[in-house]
Amino acid sequence: MGTNYYAVRIMDGEEKELAKELIENDQYEVLIDLINEKYSKIHIGKKSYGWKFLFNYHNGRYYEATKRSLNDFLSCHSIIDECGKEISLESFWRIVEDSKDGMDNKQYYEREGLSKDLVMLDDFLSEKILSYKPCFYEFYNDGLRFSTLNDFS
């Protein structure tokens, strides 16, 4: 069993005023587009029992594969779990830290006797991901574990 975590962008004062203006002018479709474009949930990653935290890299769209970049990104967002419970940034990093001794894909594949040649170097992976030398559908950078897949929740 696991828990997925998401980032939700926090509206600043100007954006709130724009939203109010759109509502006052009955521009609901524009408001919906704005909310869907800027304020939809972004999957950060997943914590599964017995496993290291797995970050969703999103091919570098939102943050680089570093703790600093992730922290900068998350500090401008609310962090929620899949049930909608808000989590502080400090609590989130504790969750990540508490899972550091867990298993990763390489350990799992080796334990299960699966192919040791399983390396994810498919054509659809970006050059940026390939530069991290992914293996077993994941890569490590800055002490963090990232998935090469975007849809693993």
Image (spheres, rainbow, N blue to C red):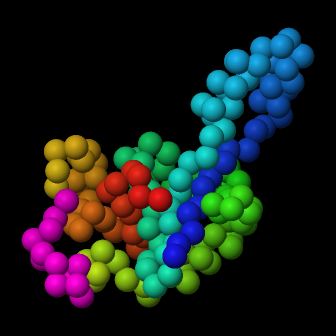
Judging depth in this view, the residue of 148 and 143 nearest the camera is 148
Q: Quadrant of residue 92?
A: bottom right
Q: How many marks?
A: 0
**Magenta: main secondary structure:** loop
**What residue sits 37% from the left and 47% below the top?**
59
In the image, is 39 to the left or to the right of 137?
right
Residue 105 drawn at (x, y percent): 30, 75
Q: Does residue 32 appear to the left or right of 22 in the view shown? A: left
Residue under the point 16% across and 45% down = 123
Picture layout, residue 48 above or below residue 80: below
Residue positioned most to the front:
1
- Closer to the camera, 59 or 33? 33
Q: Residue furthest top?
A: 25
Residue lying at 42% horizontally and 48% vertically, measured from the top left: 58
Q: Position of residue 40 (x, y in %)?
A: 62, 40
Which span of residues is magenta-colored?
109-120
Position of residue 130 measured from the top left corner of the image (x, y, whole percent):
22, 53
- Can residue 3 be seen here? The reply is yes
Q: Quadrant of residue 124?
A: top left
Query: Does residue 15 belong to the magenta stretch?
Result: no
Q: Residue furthest right?
A: 24
Residue 68 appearing in the image: no
Which residue is at 36% across, 61% downward?
Answer: 147
Q: Position of residue 74 (x, y in %)?
A: 62, 55
Residue 110 colored magenta?
yes
119, above or below 29, in the image: below
